[in-house]
């Protein structure tokens, strides 16, 4: 089975890093994967998108994801300027960094809406650079709650491959706290 994932965020939130961590964690689980960043000369705060494919078989295509199974939104405010639902498959999953419950977002009933207040979690932990909460690893925790093919342990190993010491520990803590505070709705 091929799973396609699209990540939306703003420059500086770790969207590209999150895509790479998802792909790496998938490989650690024995799956095939690819991460495809899509950005130009964006500056901090500008909309950024990245793509991930995960499969149990070799992946032969290498292009942007047009019809994702899962969309991950790092900043709820992007939903007013970017059509994050574009191409999302019926019965797809939408994971949003939001302080609201899924039912409060008034989204189509055909998708499963998942929310987590990732910003609050990372601000509390001090994972902020130049005023921007680095929500990438917290969003991985929420993603892991609904995408059961990649364990928290695989994400933890991928995080430790990218950071060490206090940075690794804080990112792992953000991921686990988000996992435990994710709300899944319709």
Image: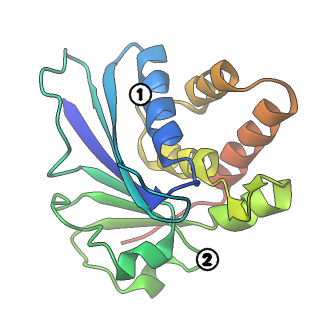
Residue 163 coordinates in the image, percent (x, y): 72, 26
Quadrant into which the N terminus falls: top left
Residue 121 versus residue 78 in the image, above or below: above
Dot 2 falls on a residue whose secondary structure is loop
Examine the image and state in which quarter residue 44 appears. Answer: bottom right
The mark total stands at 2
According to the picture, the residue beneath numbered tag 2 turns out to be: 99
**Camera-nearest label, 2 or 1:** 1
Of all residues, the one furthest to the front in this rendering is 41
Alpha carbon distance from label 2 to label 1: 27 Å
Residue 98 coordinates in the image, percent (x, y): 56, 73
Q: For this rendering, which residue is in front, 90 or 5? A: 5
Residue 34 versus residue 42 in the image, above or below: above
Q: Residue at x 31, y 52 (%)?
A: 70
Residue 102 versus residue 152 in the image, above or below: below
Residue 65 versus residue 152 in the image, above or below: below
Q: Residue at x 25, y 68 (%)?
A: 85
Q: Residue at x 60, y 33 (%)?
A: 152
| Left or right of 11 in this view: 172 | right
Examine the image and state in which quarter residue 122 appears. Answer: bottom right
Q: For this rendering, which residue is in front, 124 or 127? A: 127
- Tell me whether circle 2 and circle 1 mark residues in contact (CB < 8 Å): no
Which of marks 1 and 2 precedes in the sequence? 1
According to the picture, the residue beneath numbered tag 1 turns out to be: 23
């Amino acid at each position: 089975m091929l799973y396609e994932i699209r990540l939306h965020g703003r420059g500086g939130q770790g969207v590209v890093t999150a895509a790479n961590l998802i792909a790496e964690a998938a490989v650690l689980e024995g799956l095939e994967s690819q991460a495809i960043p899509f950005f130009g000369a964006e500056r901090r705060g500008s909309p950024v998108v990245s793509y991930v494919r995960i499969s149990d078989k070799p992946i032969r295509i290498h292009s942007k994801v047009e019809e994702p199974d899962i969309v991950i939104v790092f900043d709820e405010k992007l939903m007013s300027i970017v059509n994050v639902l574009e191409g999302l498959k019926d019965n797809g999953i939408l994971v949003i960094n939001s302080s609201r419950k899924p039912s409060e977002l008034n989204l189509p009933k055909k998708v499963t809406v998942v929310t987590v207040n990732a910003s609050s979690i990372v601000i509390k932990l001090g994972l902020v650079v130049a005023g921007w909460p680095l929500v990438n690893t917290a969003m991985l925790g929420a993603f892991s709650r609904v995408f059961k093919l990649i364990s928290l342990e695989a994400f933890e190993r991928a995080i430790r491959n990218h950071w060490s010491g206090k940075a690794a520990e804080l990112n792992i803590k953000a991921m686990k706290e988000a996992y435990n505070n994710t709300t899944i709705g319709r």
